[in-house]
Image (tube, rainbow, N blue to C red):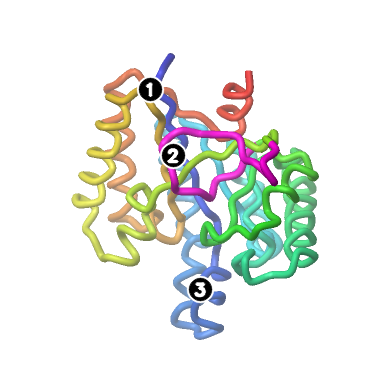
Amino acid sequence: MKFPILLTFDFDAEFVMENMYGDDPYWVSQGQYGANEGVARVLRLLEREGIKASFCVVGKSAEKYPDVVKSIARAGHETAVHGWTHKYYNALTKTEEERGIRKTRGLLEKLTGVTPKGHRTPGWRPSKNTISILEKEGFLWNSDYLGCDMPFFNYVEKRKTRVLEIPVAYTLDDWDLFYSHGNTPQMVFEVWKEEFDHLYDEKKMLCLTCHPLVSGRPSRIGALERFIHYAKTFNVEFMRCRDFAEMWRK
């Protein structure tokens, strides 16, 4: 079996910044970069490399930038639910959380013609209700938890669900490495390379979390491109999360 690599991109646009900093134009415009420039640059890279990926889309991003979402789908990439706003689920009521998931899924389905089967909570901050909601709504996969390297089926009250968890990691997140700590593209590539080397040797998997407003910058896209080129020298398969979840289920 080839080593699975899942490239995921959180299309937050300005709504991640509004959740963190309010409506200050300085921050909002940084978020808008993802919609105006970042997604297109990421899509061009993925097309050159022949890779299909998964885009976790905030509902309000899809509402404001429908043509961007359509361009993602036309390229054959998966669109997944990433909340209606970028508010963390553990700050919402169950009704608000459930309504946001359904509303986002409905809009993405309308724009792409495909019912989303994947989900990621804004900020990786699920609530105690998230998995039960996803199971009820028929989602195949979720991607929030950092506690292990390999996927697993989530549990609700000691009952195994059909929702596959695809683990994430701060060391495999461009936001943490670039935005939070100001690392250079070379430093980020080295971190991703080292993570890959060890996980590959251990015959596990790798899920990379990127953001078009971060890795979509001209200099930073180079770190992702170098990582892709490096990984391709090994026996790997780049997969959409949906395809990976269906394979794992079998």
Q: Residue at x 55, y 83 (%)?
A: 23
Q: Quadrant of the C terminus?
A: top right
Q: Is residue 179 above or below residue 27?
A: above
User: Residue 63 sits in which quadrant?
Assistant: bottom right
Q: Secondary structure at mark 2?
A: strand
Looking at this view, name the residue that lies furthest to the bottom.
Answer: 24
- At label 1, the amino acid type is Val
Q: Residue at x 63, y 39 (%)?
A: 141
247 and 185: which one is in front? Answer: 247
* Magenta part of the chain: 141-159
Image mark for residue 199: none
Q: Is residue 170 visible?
A: yes
Q: Which residue is mark 1?
A: 236
Q: Residue at x 68, y 60 (%)?
A: 59
135 and 103: which one is in front? Answer: 135
Q: CA distance from mark 3 to mark 1?
A: 35 Å
Q: Is residue 13 above or below residue 3?
A: below
Image mark for residue 207: 2
- At label 2, the amino acid type is Cys
User: Residue 73 sits in which quadrant?
Assistant: top right
Question: Is there a contact, CB below 8 Å, between mark 2 and mark 1?
Answer: no
Looking at this view, name the residue that lies furthest to the front.
Answer: 158
Q: Which residue is mark 3?
A: 17
Q: Secondary structure at mark 1?
A: strand
Q: CA distance from mark 3 to mark 2?
A: 24 Å
**Labels 2 and 1: the sequence-earlier one:** 2
**Labels 3 and 2: the sequence-earlier one:** 3
- At label 3, the amino acid type is Met
Image position, residue 34 (x, y; %): 49, 61
Question: Is there a contact, CB below 8 Å, between mark 3 and mark 2?
Answer: no
